[in-house]
Image: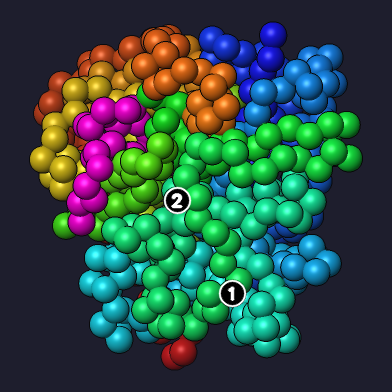
Amino acid sequence: MKYILALDQGTTSSRAILFDQAGHPHAVAQKEFPQIFPRNGWVEHDPMEIWTSQLAVAREVLATAGLLAGDIAAIGITNQRETTILWDRLTGHPIHHAIVWQDRRTAPYCDQLKREGHLDLIREKTGLVIDAYFSASKIRWLLDHVPGAREKADRGELAFGTVDSWLLWKLTGGAVHVTDASNASRTMIYNIRTLQWDDELLELMQIPRAILPQVRSCSEVYGETDRSLFGASIPIAGMAGDQQAALFGQTCFSRSLAKNTYGTGCFMLMNIGTQPIVSEHKLLTTVAWQRNGVTEYALEGSVFIGGAVVQWLRDGLKIVKYAAEIESLAATVPHNGGVYMVPAFAGLGAPHWDQYARGSISGITRGTTAAHFARAALQSIAFQVADVLDVMQKDSGIQIEELRVDGGAASNNLLLQFQADLLRVPVIRPQVTETTALGAAYLAGLAVGYWKGQEEVRTHWQVDRTFEPQLNETKVRHLRSRWSEALRRSMDWEEHEKDCALE
């Protein structure tokens, strides 16, 4: 029996998962790597840590399963998106730390682009809003702030890539500089209508075309691994950004199917078919995947801080020792005690896009306990997701009948029950929740004939548990009203802080 190896390179860890013909995980390896915070609001990764951790878990999972390179039909890659890396083409060495998607250092430049009136142009061409979240402003920052970078870039000596491109480059020994359409659509310089890097946007951002990777589909053979890595070559045949991969892994192949991933952030995507829709409510229009010459699109709402709020309770406040303890702690109280937590640690994403919002906790009394904080933290995740779904349904004109969920926090029953209560629709957790890695595996396997087609893949999706709404609508309206008030108080905080500092 052969397997598909999925490389799932995330924001806080690198993982490798082997999948069998039935789409079941056969073996898993995971390794965390350091987060770097040079200044307030800045988030970086060491690209070499990304690479070495990803290579280590790939080798580990093969060793654990007792497999050799010849037992692997193909490799699929999925990755944290928007995170930006520039490296020297000759040496293969990064010229700076990777600037992570959460990083806010380019917010002032993004404000400048808005003031200059480029909002509609960028939204129409890329499907994105202007925000420091995306890669373009990060590329420009690196070119402007790393000594000699712009001169090298103009001479074609540098390569840009999101993490998928970086891993592909390293896996192929520097032979292949390619990205896929889903990741390209997250850069703010890729035209999702022409499916090309856009010259007008490149000129606006002062980014030379010479540094850009070739854009290919999400399911095809890009190249083979360097023989020295695994003892023999393995075809690399699938790539997609983590959220698009999860949409594919959830088999949301039909228009109107939607999923939400509860990871470091929360990401809701709805398949909208083969024609892009420009959102009227600050959602993103993104390439879902491109396969066999057909491009499918999705509406996306990105919540910056999802599961990361639990990490903050663990590491920052030290309320729990392990993230998994948060559910049992929250369950010791019957409600949130009037406490609302807005985890706007890196600003607010969809549908607000307030890069100057900051986190807040409202409604604290002498009776507030750590358990109330835990419950408010979990509820904050669900509130943010509900806000996104509201506007997604307005933009698409589709009322969803169910929401498919995955990601680390999807194992939290308390969270998913509250999510169903807020949304008023069933929330469905599949048996295999590793849907991000599974989507990358499916894309790779389809490219090499491991699976015959999407209909075969669809039969693998099975329900683990369905959470039905239980709270009455009056209670839900009250909860969401109070959440909206707490949210309002968190907005524009950093801007006001700057004003006070100037005084």
Q: Residue at x 57, y 61 (%)?
A: 213
Estimate how packed mark 2 is, as few (under 14), some (14 to 19) or many (20 or more) residues with alpha carbons within 10 Å. many
Q: Quadrant of the N terminus?
A: top right
Residue nearest the viewer, comparing 305 with 145: 145
The verdict on residue 66 being magenta is: no
Measure the alpha-carbon separation of dots 2 and 1.
Answer: 18 Å
Q: Is disc 2 placed on a helix, strand or loop?
A: helix
Q: Which residue is mark 1?
A: 210
What is the magenta range? 252-278
First reached walking from the N terminus: tag 2 or tag 1: 2
Q: Is residue 312 left or right of residue 376?
A: right
Q: Could you tell me the amino acid type at mark 2?
A: Ala
Q: Residue at x 32, y 15 (%)?
A: 467
Whole-percent x, y for residue 279 in the image: 20, 55
Q: Which residue is mark 2?
A: 181
- With respect to residue 49, does 146 lie above or below? below
- With respect to residue 182, does 464 lie above or below? above
Residue 327 visible within the image: no
Estimate how packed mark 1 is, as few (under 14), some (14 to 19) or many (20 or more) residues with alpha carbons within 10 Å. some
Whole-percent x, y for residue 264 in the image: 53, 42
Label 1 near label 2: C-beta < 8 Å? Answer: no
